[in-house]
């Protein structure tokens, strides 16, 4: 007899898997010294899932970092 999960159990399982994936991604991000926090990584993942080109996203992040970097006087 197949095991049938309730909708809430499936939803919780999916949420937990997404959280674990984000935690792994954040750890990898820290090892690579990207400087991206979990909130920013989540936004990046959503943009990539929506079809944004990875190279374009990387360029935008670099430009934003350059523009927001404090200038030396």
Image: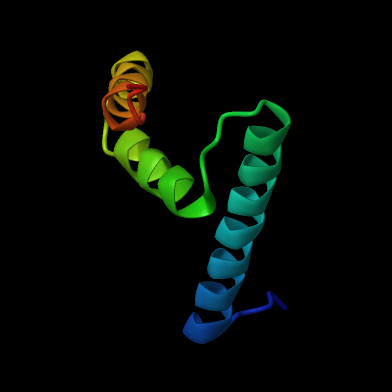
Looking at the rendering, which quadrant does residue 53 occupy? Answer: top left
Q: Nearer the viewer, residue 73 or 8?
A: 73
Question: Residue 64's x, y, as percent?
Answer: 29, 28
Residue 51, relative to residue 39: is it above or below? above
- In which quadrant is the C terminus drawn? top left
Residue 4, relative to residue 15: is it above or below? below
**Left or right: where 67 falls relative to 61:** left
**Left or right: where 57 falls relative to 29:** left
Q: Nearer the viewer, residue 46 or 40?
A: 40
Residue furthest to the front in view is 73
Looking at the rendering, which quadrant does residue 27 occupy? Answer: top right
- What sort of colour scheme is used for the picture? rainbow
Q: Residue at x 67, y 37 (%)?
A: 30
Residue 59, relative to residue 49: is it above or below? above
- In which quadrant is the N terminus drawn? bottom right
Q: Residue at x 35, y 27 (%)?
A: 61
Q: Nearer the viewer, residue 24 or 14?
A: 24
**Left or right: where 47 falls relative to 24:** left
**Left or right: where 68 falls relative to 41:** left
Question: Residue 37's x, y, as percent?
Answer: 52, 47
Q: Residue at x 61, y 70 (%)?
A: 13
Question: Residue 42's x, y, as percent?
Answer: 44, 49
Looking at the rendering, which quadrant does residue 24 occupy? Answer: top right
Disc tally is 0
Q: Residue at x 42, y 46 (%)?
A: 40
Question: Residue 3's x, y, as percent?
Answer: 68, 78
């Amino acid at each position: 007899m197949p095991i049938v999960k309730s909708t809430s159990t499936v939803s919780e399982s999916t949420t937990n898997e997404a959280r674990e994936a984000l935690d792994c991604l954040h750890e990898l991000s820290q090892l690579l010294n990207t400087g991206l926090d979990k909130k920013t990584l989540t936004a990046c993942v959503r943009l990539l899932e929506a079809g944004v080109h990875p190279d374009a996203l990387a360029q935008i992040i670099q430009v934003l970092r350059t523009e927001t970097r404090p200038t030396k006087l």
